[in-house]
Image: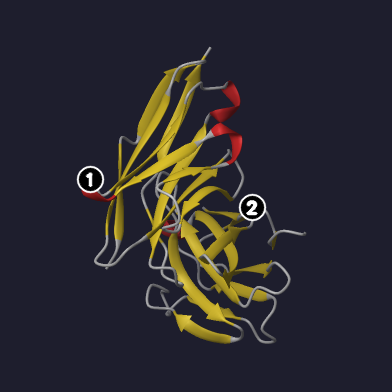
Amino acid sequence: AQSVTQLGSHVSVSEGALVLLRCNYSSSVPPYLFWYVQYPNQGLQLLLKYTSAATLVKGINGFEAEFKKSETSFHLTKPSAHMSDAAEYFCAVSHGGNDMRFGAGTRLTVKP
Amino acid sequence: EAGVAQSPRYKIIEKRQSVAFWCNPISGHATLYWYQQILGQGPKLLIQFQNNGVVDDSQLPKDRFSAERLKGVDSTLKIQPAKLEDSAVYLCASSFFDRVGNTIYFGEGSWLTVV
């Protein structure tokens, strides 16, 4: 069965600094990969998804993620953090069907 | 386009009481999910419907949890009797298949506190 591991339950960056949230996946077949963001007291919002078209995926709010098969990784990055980026971020994997599995999440804190 | 609607947003009950959550998916989405998200964890799938049929309920505690989607649109998740460990956010989601696969869209969640 497929799974994802998010490295680091908490990440803290300064405003304007690079954001890097790590996600490694395990899958026996080519995966579909997702990043979701959850703001306080809200549901999950899709940031971006990888579906084998292009390895570098651009999402909303200036985020992007790169699929690296050799490293089984799908890390999320943003060049310059903003205070409004503070939230919980979840990586997820599926096989394109109704079988999505989520990581435990990474809480991003942005310091002024 | 309207998103996934859930109610109530917040509920506090005593243990052994019952509670019900309602979900209205995005129009046209055949697949509906209920997830449980315990504080500090990622969402865990409880049950998945395809139209009004159950696709996967392997992680649903069937002795106390039940869910239905009678007309293939709205869904209700019930917990009876509730336990302290049921305190969590219950997320409803819906999805559809397009040319790039399946994308799940979430509601804002129903926050349950069992005291």
Chain to which mark 2 belongs: B
Residue B34: x and y, percent?
53, 67
Direction from residue B17 to residue A31 in the image, left or right: left
Chain to which mark 1 belongs: A
Q: Characterize the local packing of mark 2: few (<14), some (14-19) or many (20 or more) Cα atoms within 10 angstroms.
A: many
Residue at figure coordinates x 48%, y 60% from the top left: B36
Q: Is residue B7 visible?
A: no
| Rendered image quadrant of residue B62 | bottom left
Tell me how the rendering is colored.
secondary structure
Direction from residue B107 to residue A29 in the image, left or right: left
Q: Quadrant of the N terminus of chain A?
A: bottom left
Task: Kindly state the secondary structure of the residue where label 1 is placed.
Answer: helix
Q: Give the residue at mark 2.
A: B108
Residue A93: x and y, percent?
38, 58
Residue at figure coordinates x 55%, y 59% from the top left: B90
Q: Is the residue under label 2 in contact with that under label 1 (CB below 8 Å)? A: no
Residue A68, compared with residue B7, is above or below; it is above
Residue A97: x and y, percent?
45, 72
Q: Is residue A107 visible?
A: yes
Q: Give the residue at mark 1.
A: A71
Residue A62, compared with residue B71, is above or below; it is above
The numbered disc on residue B104 is none
| Mark 1 or 2: the one toward you | 1
Q: Nearer the viewer, residue A5 or A97?
A: A97
Task: Kindly state the secondary structure of the residue where label 2 is placed.
Answer: loop
Residue A59, compared with residue B49, is above or below; it is above
Q: Characterize the local packing of mark 1: few (<14), some (14-19) or many (20 or more) Cα atoms within 10 angstroms.
A: few
* Amino acid at dot 2: Glu
* Amino acid at dot 1: Glu
Residue at figure coordinates x 63%, y 82% from the top left: B69
Q: Nearer the viewer, residue B83 or B103?
A: B103
Residue A53: x and y, percent?
45, 56
